[in-house]
Amino acid sequence: MEDSSRDQPAIVSVLSTYVRSHAKRPRTGTGAFKGLASDIKAALTALDKREPVHDSAPTDLRGANLQGANLQGVHLGDADLRGANLRGANLSGAELANADLRGAYLRDADLFGGTLVGADLRDADLHGTNLVAANLRGAKR
């Protein structure tokens, strides 16, 4: 998105919508989690590489099923991750300042060294989550 800063808000919106609609929670009883599809990984990589200074609205990944995703060092500050399934995700070193993680499922996720300054973690499931060296200053719980 480096070459299209004017179009970045629209691109972020399209990619976010794609991830939300294609990375849905599996129905109960449908078997073991098989990992993220390559198209979802590609969309998340593009979202991570954006220049946040050009964002006019937060990245909206509400309810997305990102279970087990490798999101190490991802830049999702101000993102809307309400109700997202991030169980077992690698979010070590992630930038999640001011992210809305209300009701997110972060059980067994790795947030080692992550930045969650001002993040909203109310009703988030943090059982087994690695928060060692994470910056939680001003986070709401």
Image (spheres, rainbow, N blue to C red):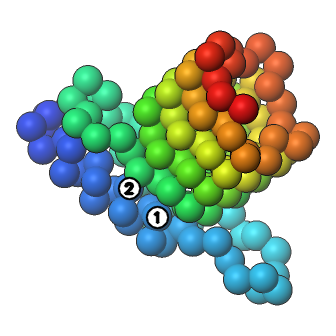
Q: How many marks?
A: 2
Q: Quadrant of residue 59?
A: top left
For residue 82, side relative to residue 42 (left or right): right
Q: Where does the image place residue 119, in percent across and percent down from the top left?
A: 58, 29
Residue type pointed to by label 1: Arg
The residue at the point 44 percent across, 33 percent down is 78
The disc placed on residue 8 is none
Crowding near the residue tagged with mark 2, few <14, some 14–19, many ≥20 C-alpha atoms within 10 Å: many
Q: Residue at x 67, y 57 (%)?
A: 85
Left or right: residue 63 versus residue 77 is right
Instruction: Give the Cα distance between marks 2 and 1.
Output: 6 Å
Question: Is residue 96 something that shows in the picture?
Answer: no
Residue 12 in the image, given as x and y percentages of width and height: 29, 48
How many residues crowd around disc 1 within 10 Å: few (fewer than 14), some, or many (20 or more)?
A: many
Callout 2: SS: helix
Q: Is residue 119 visible?
A: yes
For the residues labelled 2 and 1, say whether their Cβ atoms are less than 8 Å apart. yes
Q: Nearer the viewer, residue 116 or 19?
A: 116
Amino acid on which the number 2 mark rests in the picture: Ser
Q: In the rendered image, which residue does mark 2 sit on?
A: 16
Which residue of the protein is positioned furthest toward the bottom in this rendering? 29
In x, y percent, where is residue 106?
Answer: 75, 46
Residue sticking out furthest to the left:
6
As drawn, 66 above or below 140: below
Q: Secondary structure at mark 1?
A: helix
Mark 1 lies on residue: 20
> Image height check: is 73 above or below 117?
below
58 sits to left or right of 41:
left
Quadrant of the rendering where the N terminus is positioned: top left
Image coordinates for residue 135, horizontal then vertical, percent: 67, 15
